[in-house]
Amino acid sequence: MEETNASALPRFSVLQQRMHTLSSAALRAEVGDGALHLKAGQVYRDTTFIPVSASHLQAQDLDSDFKAERGRIDAIASRLALSDPVLHQSLSPEDSLARMLFDLLEQYRTEALSSTTSHIGVQRNIRYRFDAWCALSKNSGLVESRLGILLFTVIQMVRTRLFATPIDEDYEDLIEATRAGIAPMIGESLLGLRRCTSSQSDYAVHALKLAQTIADMIHQSQDERDEESDAERVINTFALLLEDEAALSEDAAIASGKKSTAFEQHNGEYQVFTREFDTEVDAASLVRAAQLDAFRIQLDKQFQALGINCRDIARKLARYLSQPQRDGWQFGEEEGYIDGRRLAQIVTSPMETRLFMKERYVTKPDSMVTLLIDCSGSMRQHIEHVTLLVDGLVRSLGLAGIPSEVLGFTTNAWNGGKSHQQWMAKGRPALPGRLNDVCHLVFKDADMHWRQGRKNIAALMKADLFREGIDGEAVEWACQRMQRVDVSRRVLLVLSDGCPMDTATNLMNDAFYLDNHLRSVVEQREKRGDIIMGLGIGLDLSRYYRNSLALDIAQPLHHRVFVDIVALMASSIKRASMR
């Protein structure tokens, strides 16, 4: 992965990560739908993208204001809980501007309903979000154009009517002239909105009329003054989504916002030009023995200085990664199955009640954990931090009696290697698929005891292992290896700092090819029962992994990081058991 690609993903602080987790939980609780979650600020039900077509609820706005973010979640929850999307879609007008306003009016209806039926905290959060958006819109110059002030005025008039609250005095003088001019044309519709708030179908009659009236005014203004470019700028500033639901659901590349043309032209099937030069190697064999010893000594000193309590982490891991297993019988019980060997006691000791036996269950580890490490170029700068984290997790898993595997993925060359050369020799066929030599690294096998594997893990410190990253194939490979271990639960932790990146593959297909494949692999493996989590090295990986945690690499590694990872495992296991 190149630095430019890594930086395209949002960097998350620990506080932002916790806010993201709480927001997802709040959304599920308020709507009563356990399948809802957030990816990069966007709403999903399982893997289905749910568009939020309202100007004041866009994810990129006010993302550093946690109270505004909570108001956004409450407002989205009100729409999901109180609006029938099928009915709304059937009533939506064809004109894009009218549809934009119709969507917005329905959002305001649900917020008004929610504010009258929900706790006072929800009311305050929704109001705070709207006020913050109004201030942002004013400061960004939205209201400086004729069309901008028209839309802003309509929004203020609708909100004050539905919520029965006065217009903020900061905007009263600003919109007064425009309000006086349009009030006669939309006054009747505004009254109808207020009367019919509790009925979506009745409300829609007045919303459609109001939306079409304003849309006609905007179209007329464009025709008269040739303000098309101004209209486009205002609409983009409002960020009211004009595309239909099908277009919006092109989630693609939650990382990039695009679907891969090459991926779709092969009917969603991932292509590999050749596997002839792919390798799977023991990582320790790539490092001189003396250098490996030196790495291990260096890591031991650093880890000891951190003061991580691995036994405490091991206890927490055992709690969530163990399951009750039958372990024979308990005899001399007062209830249960009759113990045939003690039937004679009924005659000899009629008062004796301990004649029964029960099945005995003990809690034993019945899971395995694989750590899959992105060994692409941009990870090199973080590798000391990552190696200490991996070392601590493997120690803790070993102390808990849970088998673990440590794997890595990179390429054998930059910019394509032998695969790329073979492609050129064969006449450069179009859309060749993956076009580099994959290198999969085994640092610790699942059968290897954690104490024996510690030395091999130190091979992560070798700098020249890091080239490019083809994440989707690596996730598939790691999941296939886990199938060899006879356990009931398999957990994959992917440590990465950005998007999949291979220059040759992207250039000869498109920039989103590997991106789309990774999301497809994660989705399919989760459907098969694998539990996959993304640990973002200073970044948010929620766009790829439903279960993710952003690690703050600016801070020294400490005990709390491991506790947060265990908590992620616990919540991921619980969520998987509910599917």
Image (cartoon, grey):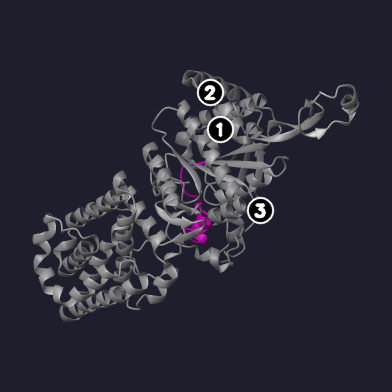
Q: Position of residue 20 (x, y in %)?
A: 40, 45
Q: Is the Cβ of the residue at disc 2 closer than 8 Å to that at disc 3?
A: no
- Which of these two is toward me, 84 or 213? 84
Dot label at residue 275:
3
Can you tell which quarter of the image residue 311 is in?
A: top right
Question: Mark 2 is on which residue type?
Answer: Leu
**How many residues crowd around disc 1 within 10 Å: few (fewer than 14), some, or many (20 or more)?**
many
Q: CA distance from mark 2 to mark 1?
A: 11 Å
Q: CA distance from mark 2 to mark 3?
A: 35 Å
| Residue identified by numbered label 1 | 460
Q: Secondary structure at mark 3?
A: loop
Query: Which residue does the image show at 39% across and 65% down from the upper left?
Result: 83
Q: Secondary structure at mark 1?
A: helix
- Which of these two is toward me, 48 or 275? 48
**How many residues crowd around disc 2 within 10 Å: few (fewer than 14), some, or many (20 or more)?**
many
Q: Is residue 224 visible?
A: yes
Query: Which residue does the image show at 62% across and 39% down from the upper left?
Result: 441
Question: Mark 3 is on which residue type?
Answer: Arg
- Which of these two is toward me, 231 or 43? 43
Q: Earlier in the sequence, mark 3 or mark 1?
A: 3
Q: Earlier in the sequence, mark 2 or mark 1?
A: 2
Question: Mark 1 is on which residue type?
Answer: Leu
| Residue identified by numbered label 2 | 299
